C-alpha cells in the first residue's frame, strides 16, 4: 500500500538552516512581510528572497501557491520554495499551501519554516495528500519521497491536530489505493482480505459469505455476482468508540463492471475497476476513524461483487427478489449497483439498527452529465441531516450538490411484472436511481445517498491529487462524524 511521506514537527532552529538538505519551504504573506525565518533565509541567500517577492511573478501568484528558487547560494539545500500564505490562513488556503509545497519539491526532503503561521496541521495534510503516487506496478517506481520536517515554536502543542490530520491522509490513501488497483488483483476475495487487516487498528470486521447472504435473502445482490467466478461478499466493519446507535456507511463494491449481458462499449471499460469507489470511501473512513480513535460508533458495510457476462449471469427481463421482499425486474444488467445496495441497505437497518445511514456509489453516468467531475450528487429524505453533510463537505473542500427525489421519479421505475424495475430510463437517471434506493430505506430512517460517479476518479490532476483516484468523501465524512456524532 502507498505510504505517506514521513512528516514530523520540530522546534524552530534557525541556526541550523544553512545545513538543511533537500528543500526549504518559506511562508510569506501577500504584502511581502518577512518573518524571522524568512529574514534568515533571505540573509543566507544574499537577498534572493527579497528580490523574488518584488517580482511581478510573485505579485500575480495566487494564495497558497509556490515559487521555486533553485540552487540558492548560501544554503546546502537544492531549492528554496516560497509559498504565498497569510499568517492566519483559512483551512483551504493552508492545505493548498502544503499541496503546492509537495508538488514543488517532488521526492526531495523538505524543511518547512512554519513558525508564526496558523493551521500547521492543515498545511501538513495538504503536503501529505499531494505526495500520493500509485506506483505499485511500475518497473521504475522512482525515488521514495524524502522526509518532511515542519519547524514550529511548540511542536507538542500541534501533536494532536497533526496526528488527526495524518490519520485522514492515511484514510484517503487507503481509498485511493483500493480504487486504483486492477480487478485481476483486487477481486472480491482480496478486497475482503484487505479490510480484515483493519482489525489490527481495533476495527471489528465480519465477512458474510455467499451461503450467509443466501440465507439472509439477498437475492438482488447475489444476482449481480452470479455470472462471475469471484464469490460475492458483504464485509461489515464496526468502530466502537462511543455510545448509542451507530452512524452507518454503506458502499457499492463492484470490483469490475462489464455491464453484464447489457455489456458496456469496449472504449473506456478499463475504467470500471473504479466501480467499487463507494466501498473504497467507506473503507478509508473506517481506517481514519480507527487511527485517530474517534469517539463515535460507526459501522461500515460494503457489498463486494463482480458483474460479468456468463452463461449463469442475470439477464434483462429476469425478476429477482430483494432481502426486503420487494421484487425487481432487471431491465438492464448494467444498472447493477443499486441491486447490490438495495440488499446491503436493508440488512444494515435490520442488523445494525443505525441512527442514520449514508450510502456511497459510483452509481450513474447521469450524475456525471449533471454535475461533471466537480461535485457528487446528494440525495436525502432528511433536510437537517443533508444540511449537516453539506456543511461538512464544504468545510473540507469536497464538492457536493443536492439533487431531487420525488414521486414523479418514482413513477418511472414502476413496471407491470414486478414491484419495481431497476432503471427508469435516461431522463433524470440519477434521481430515478436514488428513488430506487429509497425503497429500501425505512420511513423514519435519516438517509443520504451520495452518487460519486464523477468524483471518485478524475482524468486530470487536482490540487490535492495526481490524475486518477481522488479519495473524495473520506474528509467530508470524517468531518461529519467529528461534528455530529462524536461525544467529548
Image (cartoon, grey):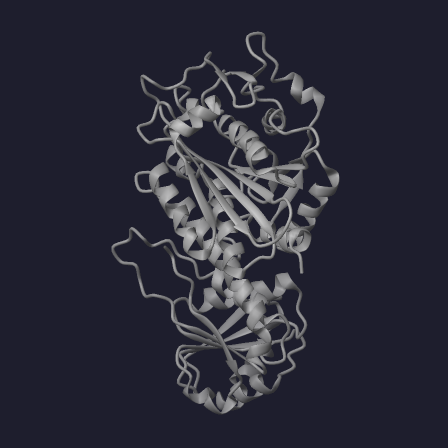
Q: Is residue 225 found left or right of 25 in the rendered image?
A: left
Instruction: Tell me what residue is drawn at x 44 percent, y 24 percent.
Output: 215
| Quarter assignment of residue 445 | top right
- On the image, the x and y values in percent for residue 380 come to 67, 35
Q: Is residue 444 above or below residue 290?
A: above
Q: Nearer the viewer, residue 304 or 66?
A: 304
Residue 272 in sight in this render: yes
Q: Is residue 336 above or below residue 294?
A: above
Residue 74 in sight in this render: no
The residue sitting at the left extreme is 139
Which quadrant: the N terminus? bottom left
- On the image, the x and y values in percent for residue 434 come to 61, 29
Q: Nearer the viewer, residue 361 or 357?
A: 357
- On the image, the x and y values in percent for residue 225 come to 39, 26
Q: Nearer the viewer, residue 8 or 431?
A: 8
- On the image, the x and y values in percent for residue 272 come to 41, 35
Instruction: Tell me what residue is drawn at x 37 percent, y 19 percent.
Output: 313
Q: Is residue 479 found left or right of 184 in the rendered image?
A: right
Instruction: Tell me what residue is drawn at x 63 percent, y 29 percent.
Output: 441
Which quadrant: the C terminus? bottom right
Amino acid at each position: 500500500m502507498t505510504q505517506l511521506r514521513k512528516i514530523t514537527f520540530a522546534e524552530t532552529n534557525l541556526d541550523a538552516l544553512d545545513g538543511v538538505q533537500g528543500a526549504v519551504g518559506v511562508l510569506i504573506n501577500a504584502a511581502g512581510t518577512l518573518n524571522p525565518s524568512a529574514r534568515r533565509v533571505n540573509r543566507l541567500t544574499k537577498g534572493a528572497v527579497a528580490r523574488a517577492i518584488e517580482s511581478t511573478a510573485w505579485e500575480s501568484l495566487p494564495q497558497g501557491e509556490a515559487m521555486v528558487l533553485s540552487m540558492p547560494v548560501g544554503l546546502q539545500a537544492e531549492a528554496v520554495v516560497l509559498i504565498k500564505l497569510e499568517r492566519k490562513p483559512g483551512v483551504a488556503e493552508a492545505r493548498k499551501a502544503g499541496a503546492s509545497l509537495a508538488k514543488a519539491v517532488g521526492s526531495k526532503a523538505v524543511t518547512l519554516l512554519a513558525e508564526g503561521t496558523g493551521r500547521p496541521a492543515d498545511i501538513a495534510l495538504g503536503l501529505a495528500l499531494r505526495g500520493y503516487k500509485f506506483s505499485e506496478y511500475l518497473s521504475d517506481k522512482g525515488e521514495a519521497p524524502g522526509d518532511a520536517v515542519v519547524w514550529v515554536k511548540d511542536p507538542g502543542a500541534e501533536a494532536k491536530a497533526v496526528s488527526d490530520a495524518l490519520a485522514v491522509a492515511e484514510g484517503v490513501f487507503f481509498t485511493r489505493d483500493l480504487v486504483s488497483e486492477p480487478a485481476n488483483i483486487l477481486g472480491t476475495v482480496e478486497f475482503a482480505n484487505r479490510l480484515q487487516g483493519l482489525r489490527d487498528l481495533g476495527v471489528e470486521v465480519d465477512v458474510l459469505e455467499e451461503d450467509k447472504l443466501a440465507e439472509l435473502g439477498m437475492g438482488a445482490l447475489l444476482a449481480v455476482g452470479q455470472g462471475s467466478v469471484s464469490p460475492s461478499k458483504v464485509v461489515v466493519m464496526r468502530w466502537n468508540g462511543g455510545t448509542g446507535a451507530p452512524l452507518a456507511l454503506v458502499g457499492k463494491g463492484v470490483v469490475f463492471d462489464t455491464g453484464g449481458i447489457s455489456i458496456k462499449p469496449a472504449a473506456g471499460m478499463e475504467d470500471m475497476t473504479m466501480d467499487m469507489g463507494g466501498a473504497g470511501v467507506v473503507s478509508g473512513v473506517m481506517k481514519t476513524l480507527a487511527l485517530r480513535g474517534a469517539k463515535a460508533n460507526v459501522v461500515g458495510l460494503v457489498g463486494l461483487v463482480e458483474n460479468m457476462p456468463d452463461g449463469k449471469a442475470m439477464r434483462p427481463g429476469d425478476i429477482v427478489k430483494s432481502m426486503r421482499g420487494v421484487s425487481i425486474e432487471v431491465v438492464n444488467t448494467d444498472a447493477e449497483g443499486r441491486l447490490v445496495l438495495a440488499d446491503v441497505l436493508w440488512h444494515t437497518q435490520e442488523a445494525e439498527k443505525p441512527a442514520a445511514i449514508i450510502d456511497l456509489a459510483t452509481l450513474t453516468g447521469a450524475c456525471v452529465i449533471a454535475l461533471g467531475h466537480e461535485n457528487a450528487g446528494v440525495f436525502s429524505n432528511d433536510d437537517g441531516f443533508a444540511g449537516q453533510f453539506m456543511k461538512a463537505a464544504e468545510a473540507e473542500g469536497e464538492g457536493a450538490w443536492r439533487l431531487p427525489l420525488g414521486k414523479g421519479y418514482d413513477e418511472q421505475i414502476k413496471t407491470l411484472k414486478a414491484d419495481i424495475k431497476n432503471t427508469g430510463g435516461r431522463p433524470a437517471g440519477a434521481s430515478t436511481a436514488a428513488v430506487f434506493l429509497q425503497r429500501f430505506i425505512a420511513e423514519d430512517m435519516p438517509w443520504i445517498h451520495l452518487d460519486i460517479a464523477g468524483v471518485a476518479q478524475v482524468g486530470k490532476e487536482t490540487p490535492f491529487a495526481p490524475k486518477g483516484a481522488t479519495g473524495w468523501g473520506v474528509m467530508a465524512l470524517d468531518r461529519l462524524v467529528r461534528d455530529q456524532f462524536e461525544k467529548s
